[in-house]
Image: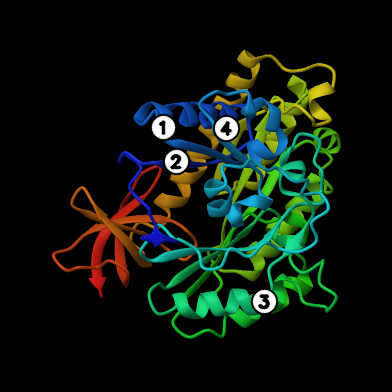
Amino acid sequence: MKIDGYKVVGSKEKADIYVINTCTVTNMSDRKSRQMLRRVKEQNKDAIVVACGCYVQVSEEELEAIKEIDIVLGNKEKADIVDYVENYKSSVEDVMHDKEFEDFGEVTYTEKTRAVIKVQDGCDRFCSYCIIPYARGRVRSRKPSSIIKEVSKLAEHIQEIVITGIHIASYGKDFKENYRLIDLLEDLNKIEGIKRIRLGSIEPLLINEEFLSRLTKLEKVCNHFHLSLQSGCNEVLKRMNRRYTIEQFEEIVELLRKAYKDVLITTDIIVGFPGETDEEFNQTYNFLNKIKLYKMHVFKYSPRKGTKAVEMPNQVEGKTKELRSKKLIELSNKNQLSYNESYIGKDLEVLIEEKKNGKFKGHTKNYVLVMCESDLDLENKIVTVSCKMAENEHVEGTVIKV
């Protein structure tokens, strides 16, 4: 692949220029970004090392102090990265005043069967633990025509698209015309060639009866929803500045279960948020045990400089976070195995993504991982698999229809 006279090489190859797109969601993300920036300089001490992205956006001075880094660029500058490299110039502009989506054009997707489509950037929610609004700025939505053009072209090669963004529930709120996420989904559903439309992480409050009445008419939309909960305790949710209650969340889960047959719901949970008592954690555990979601992605609270939560009293010690995380992961694994075992003896429609270690793997529409064997080339095909056995992370079966 070539870009304006430059050749893109593999990550293990020696390069003249290294571009590291940094993340700053957690302290671990910051540390991994710093490690990578230093590591690539070791591969070629004469190379130009460029740090860009979210970590740079919120910690410019910190990264400028790292001697291995030659150029630092914020999120706004990434579109002109070649010019900045050729002029050997750093730049980090304030993104909080940006009002339009920076459209980088066609995506570079890593999977043969699935493309990730970014439809918006920024967030206006300002959860007390999250640095992302300061790194990405306010909500800016990508123009529908640009998205539809890209997906139409991708439909020649792939069968599934994933709609993503920083806060996709806010898509369209910055448009003058009344065009929101559901309108975009209706337009994407009309594109021939695309068989599945999958939603990335969504704000729970997006889901209501009106939204579902339109969404359920779209046959390509997958019956898998990732609703970001974060805590199963109302007091903790208040301190997090989340704008819903566990009662509302439970109602939303029930709406989805009534609207979609065999719907699977996943979520994110933060344990050890400042001030989280044993009683509050137990409320979270009991709530999650009650609603029985398919899978929970559990994170230990990570203090982020510049957020309100870092200054809150009663910070929770690491050992307590670890114990709480372990307990919720065990519950998640139990739920997932129970769901997976319910598919034994059933026929599942699977989009095969790749062959690894002698087995094909792919996902159902509701995102169950399925593994199977075949002498045929099944990649990028939707096949029917009869489920024979289940494990915690996946099910296995026999191909009965190609």
Q: Which residue is mark 4?
A: 29
8 lies above or below 314: below
Marks 2 and 1, the one that precedes in the sequence: 2
Q: Are marks 3 and 1 in contact (CB under 8 Å)?
A: no
**Alpha carbon separation for disc pair 3 and 2:** 33 Å
> Dot 3 corresponds to which residue?
144
Foreground: disc 3 or disc 2: 2
Q: Secondary structure at mark 4?
A: helix
Q: What amino acid is found at the position of numbered circle 3 in the picture? A: Pro
For the residue pair 232 and 29, the one nearer the viewer reads as 29
Side of 34 relative to 307 (left or right)? left
Q: CA distance from mark 3 to mark 1?
A: 38 Å
Q: CA distance from mark 1 to mark 4?
A: 17 Å
Instruction: Give the residue at mark 2.
Output: 18
Q: Amino acid at mark 2?
A: Tyr
* Other-residue count near label 2 (Cα within 10 Å), few / some / many at <14 / 14–19 / ≥20: many
Q: Which residue, given by chain and number where applicable, does mark 1 sit on?
A: 40
Mark 4 to mark 3: distance in Å? Answer: 32 Å
Residue at the image position 83 percent from the left and 53 percent from the top: 97
Per the image, label 3 sits on a secondary structure element best described as helix
Q: Quick one: label 2 or label 4, which is nearer the N terminus?
A: 2
* Most foreground residue, 183 or 369: 183
Amino acid type of the residue that numbered disc 4 sits on in the rendered structure: Ser
